[in-house]
Image (tube, helix red, strand yellow):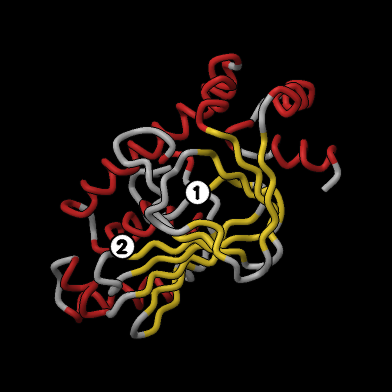
Amino acid sequence: MALNSMYENLMGLPLFNGVSYNRISEIVGNTKLAFMKYLPGETIVQAGAPCTNLMFVIGGRVRLTIRNNSDRFSLGQTLEAPTVVSPDFLFGRNTLFPATVSAIDTVSIMQIEKNDFISIIRSDEVCLYNYLNFISTNAQKAVDGVLALTTGSLEERIAFWIIALSQRDAKEIVLSCRQRDLYTLFGVQRSSFMSTLDSMKERGLIDYSPNEIRVMSRMNLRSVLLKTPD
């Protein structure tokens, strides 16, 4: 990848939003960066691996898959370059990657070690603001999601659940779970659950089968929410 192209990709990332080209080139010149290539189908990181660095996708597409312990539930999502994988797990009590990440096509990854990223945000207010805004938005999203599970309509609760488990720039989001497990989780009758899915499908928000819910557009799914979570 050409240097100018890489800089442009970095400037397109939320964590570097508003950072000038000159500042990006300075960061690249003064920071120890690791670059890796992955072929289609290769595993980039396993869920539960320690998150000790920021992982930027600067070329290609990756698939993130989150599963519960019983493997009865999973949510898959596609991220396209330029993007960053689970940056809110770099700090805090849980610093393990929540999802298994695999390459869809040939993928270019750039990694910045945690200590080097700390140096960047200490010296650059724009980067610091972007990161704080990112993790604060995710924290607020979690609170809204819990409230929606108890007070919102079933449609809102389904939307919040999917939004909470996917990144803002995620595409091709697929929730894989038996319908019986889902309507039991939400505490509703099957008839109410199916009626809600049919309504969401008719409006082009989702498509579904007995074992999957496919999100047609994450942005449109957000439109059903009384409060925008992110």
User: As shown in the figure, which amino acid type bears the numbered disc 2?
Assistant: Ile
Q: Residue at x 37, y 54 (%)?
A: 48
Residue 212: x and y in percent read 39, 78
Q: Earlier in the sequence, mark 2 or mark 1?
A: 2
Query: Dividing the image into 4 quarters, which one contains the C terminus?
Result: top left
- Looking at the image, is 203 positioned above or below residue 64? below
- Looking at the image, is 4 positioned above or below residue 223? above
- The label on residue 132 is none
Label 1: state its secondary structure.
Answer: loop
- Looking at the image, is 129 positioned above or below residue 186? above
Q: Which image quadrant is residue 163 in? A: bottom left
Residue 57: x and y in percent read 64, 49
Total tally of numbered discs in the picture:
2
Q: Residue at x 52, y 48 (%)?
A: 85
Label 1: which residue? Answer: 168
- The label on residue 158 is 2
Residue 196: x and y in percent read 29, 72
Q: Nearer the viewer, residue 36 or 8?
A: 36
Q: Nearer the viewer, residue 192 or 128?
A: 128
Q: Nearer the viewer, residue 177 or 98?
A: 98
Mark 1 Cα shell of 10 Å, populated few (<14), some (14-19), many (≥20): some
Q: Residue furthest bottom?
A: 210
Residue 136: x and y in percent read 39, 31
Q: Residue at x 40, y 79 (%)?
A: 208
Q: Which image quadrant is residue 144 in? A: top left
